[in-house]
Amino acid sequence: MNPKNNSSKRFLEIVKQLRELIHQENVAVGGKLPSERELAERLQVGRSTVREALRSLELLGLIETRRGEGTFLSDFRKHQLVELLSTFILQESTSKKDVHKTRETLEKEAIRTLCHSENYTKHSIWDAFIVKLQHEEVSREDIIREIIITSNNRLALKIWFLLKQFAGEPYRSQMSIDEKNVWIQLLTSLKNGDELMSISLYNEWLLLMDRREI
Amino acid sequence: MNPKNNSSKRFLEIVKQLRELIHQENVAVGGKLPSERELAERLQVGRSTVREALRSLELLGLIETRRGEGTFLSDFRKHQLVELLSTFILQESTSKKDVHKTRETLEKEAIRTLCHSENYTKHSIWDAFIVKLQHEEVSREDIIREIIITSNNRLALKIWFLLKQFAGEPYRSQMSIDEKNVWIQLLTSLKNGDELMSISLYNEWLLLMDRREI
DNA sequence: TAACTACGAGTGGTCAGACCACTTTGTAAT
DNA sequence: ATTACAAAGTGGTCTGACCACTCGTAGTTA
């Protein structure tokens, strides 16, 4: 009766029990969990079963293991999960085109949101970028990221970040004079809250990038 | 030399190799993977290592195992994935508001795309929906899903699907007369390719839903 | 011939024990 | 006190052995 159970998925039970144990023992982030051997004994299962559960949690980024040291509760805000899922979900069945399009959608929406925002304290941000642009000290990515951050949608930011990573685009390559000018105009119209102009300029920028065979 | 390697985390390697194998062998969703014993031999590792990788993927909901039968590639839209996503990614750091906003962004973009599309064969789809609306045989979700599908961005569709599930909104609840009318107008302007009008109507619909305390 | 039964092969689920590689710690020699 | 080294502890992996379950098939029966 001990070595088995009618229902399969024992390791899922262990995952659950591990979570409870972590909670009960009040293991802090970065804290150490009991050793695999000890867990096996306490939970009355084989070590391999414990390992399967631990490995799963590790792949999720919930715990971190260091050989010779032990298993530690990690900060689960790490991106492990996201990256993993992205490789599975985004793979192939999703064309590059879709990734581009969706990324652009998020960027446009951020611009639209900012145009309707009334937070004038942020003007200094765009002014600063305009200055930087004239002195060649800034990348596209920095600007766009700031735009999305300022639009204040963390989820959109996460997704955008993922897509950017996945697409692996040359977001940091050199900007041409034309491109800089478009950005300066775009940031300016952003300050003015001119949605139509901003979107129009964004589209112009897209065309510029297209011509460069991104 | 075989039983070990300088770098730890062998099972992570296996996870990666499994992904490649799935891809190379063109395993379809629902398709069967090689048995654990066969995988162990092919990848030149012990069965326990293979298991740790498989169990991890199972917890992610990427594969499904049935005792006595085998391991199968599962549809990621099922089970845990959404829950896990909601638990670890969307949770807390992401507010409901962001989920709504992002979902609406995707929906709007689909509408915009359709307005610029020139595929007139799809008019029949919207005509059909208009008829259904007048006879109360269709839900918001059906319409919106069709819009996004027709906009032909599979990635956006996937993300939208995830967000919809997470938000758990009453996408299927009864539609009021007003709401139906808005949709009919929206679908009509969609046929005409009138972007401004379509977006305006969409925003009108959002207001309607707001008033209902979604 | 058709339907049923029983059995064996194949597969996932689990366990125990054995090493290996690495880190920490404690102890002994300097 | 410092250093060097051995031992204990821990994760990483492999092997072989069962168990529980599914499924196809050979053999039996109606």
Image: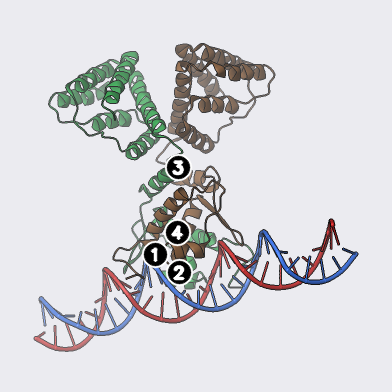
Chain colours: A green, B brown, C red, D blue
| Cα gap from disc 1 to disc 4, whole angstroms | 21 Å
**Label 1 residue SS:** loop
What is the quadrant of residue B182 in the picture?
A: top right
Protein chain holding label 3:
A
**Label 2 residue SS:** helix
Q: Residue A84: x and y, percent?
A: 40, 48
Which of pointers 3 and 2 lies earlier in the amino acid sequence?
2
| Amino acid at circle 1 | Leu
Q: Are marks 1 and 4 on the same chain?
A: no
Q: Are marks 1 and 2 on the same chain?
A: yes
| Cα gap from disc 1 to disc 2, whole angstroms | 9 Å
User: Considering only vertical position in the picture, is B86 above or below B202?
Assistant: below
Q: Which mark is residue B208?
A: none
Residue sitting at 52 percent across and 25 percent down? B150
| Amino acid at circle 2 | Leu
Which residue was labeled with disc 4? B53
